[in-house]
Amino acid sequence: GSGGGRYMKRILITGGAGFIGSNFIRYIIKSQKNFELLVNLDLLTYAGNLENLQSIESDSRYMFAKGDVRDRTLVEKLFETYDFDTVVHFAAESHVDRSIIEPELFLTTNIVGTQTLLDVAKRHWNLSPKDKYSQEYRAGVRYLQVSTDEVYGALGTAGFFTETTPLSPNSPYSASKAGADMIVRAYYETYGLPVNITRCSNNYGPYQFPEKLIPLMVHHAQRNVALPVYGDGMQIRDWLHVSDHCSAIWTVLESGRVGEVYNVGGNNERTNIEIVKCILRELGRPESLIEHVKDRPGHDRRYAIDNTKITTQLGWKPFYTFEVGIHETIQWYLNHQTWVERVTSGAYRKYCQEMYG
Ligand code: NAD
Ligand code: TYD
């Protein structure tokens, strides 16, 4: 059963200074969701930026803790201090291209980090922690793993990912996310820990780090720098506005059935080249800026989500159309050039040099 919705939640959010996590924190604070405490645990890697949270950081329910999800002592201390009943685990290394360069970091952050959180939550929430077979937990507790459709691997021209599609990851990133999902499943099957997994398609929207397709292309187009399209650019992604992902996560926290996986997507498949041309049009830049570069190794051809389960069982649906969402998003990047300049300084420039030459 669910029932999480009856409580004023005490939430641990990991990775809340990143793209989706910061949108989620702003979303639940601004739409007055029922929580009394929200602690954001984030290591502030290159992808984490507290400026993303400036508009809400003075809210009395919000607190920031700098640290690593792999640091068990720290995670235990946070549970003892704040007595969370809800965990939403966003923190991860999230970029496929970086995972090709540095796979080990992805395995430790994404898999060991997840196991550490699960283990501390289990000990803290179990009603008889000394009984190793106890599957009794406090009422209303929930651990939510924010996963990705990339764990299912690649589709051909037909078909969709459902929650029962076998996991078949192709990049070190998606393999690490699939590994994390398997550990979450094991904590449910073995220990009865009340968990959910959400698997969302590609997100777009404000505050996305400009290493990812849409903000990267806007940034290049603005400066009249070549737009690096991998291979033929006919790869397909199923794009969802980040705020619709946030509302889906909240819906699962409130009414998801314990132990279940929910796919999240808005039936919005686009080729990469279509997205890039749309950005060029919006900025009034010529298509001659497009440069086809060497394809990413192991590049998944197509992702597409079947969202029947979350829409019919939980009543969730996306708010944004792609046309409105992409327009607003491009305008957001144009209006936040100092944010872009700040996050693309130093270390990011070095990464770009290695990645794109
Ligand atoms: P992001 O890279 O923008 O943010 C990741 C955040 O995690 C950063 O703030 C970073 O500082 C933090 N972090 C990294 N390692 C940490 C550690 N060891 N301890 C604590 N904090 C750490 O990522 P995002 O795009 O916001 O993605 C968030 C989550 O959603 C990830 O789990 C990702 O796999 C998943 N997801 C992303 C998408 C997408 O399109 N971006 C789609 C589906 C699922
Ligand atoms: P990305 O934003 O990295 O997300 P993911 O690989 O997790 O889906 O990339 C989205 C698509 O855009 C993917 O097919 C790779 C492609 N892409 C490019 O063609 N050029 C680029 O410079 C980047 C970053 C991505």
Image (cartoon, rainbow, N blue to C red):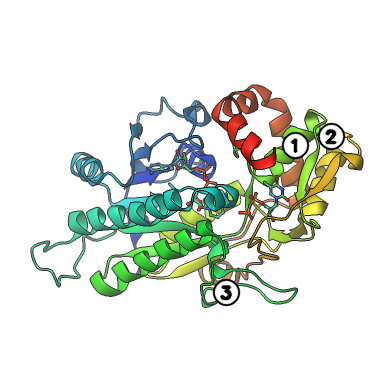
Looking at the picture, which amino acid does disc 3 mark?
A: Thr
Q: Is residue 170 left or right of residue 231?
A: left
Residue topped by disc 1: 218
Q: Secondary structure at mark 2?
A: helix
Tell me how far mark 1 sits from mark 3, CA to CA: 32 Å
Q: Is residue 135 left or right of residue 68?
A: left
Q: Is residue 274 left or right of residue 125?
A: right
Q: Residue at x 18, y 43 (%)?
A: 80
Q: Quadrant of residue 126?
A: bottom left
Q: Position of residue 62 (x, y in %)?
A: 37, 33
Q: Residue at x 58, y 28 (%)?
A: 343
Q: Secondary structure at mark 3?
A: loop
Q: Earlier in the sequence, mark 3 or mark 2?
A: 3
Residue topped by disc 3: 162
54 to 27, vertically: above or below: above
Q: Earlier in the sequence, mark 1 or mark 2?
A: 1
Q: Earlier in the sequence, mark 1 or mark 3?
A: 3
Q: Are marks 1 and 2 in contact (CB under 8 Å)?
A: yes
Ligand 1 neighbours mark 3 (CB distance < 8 Å): no
Q: Residue at x 54, y 30 (%)?
A: 347
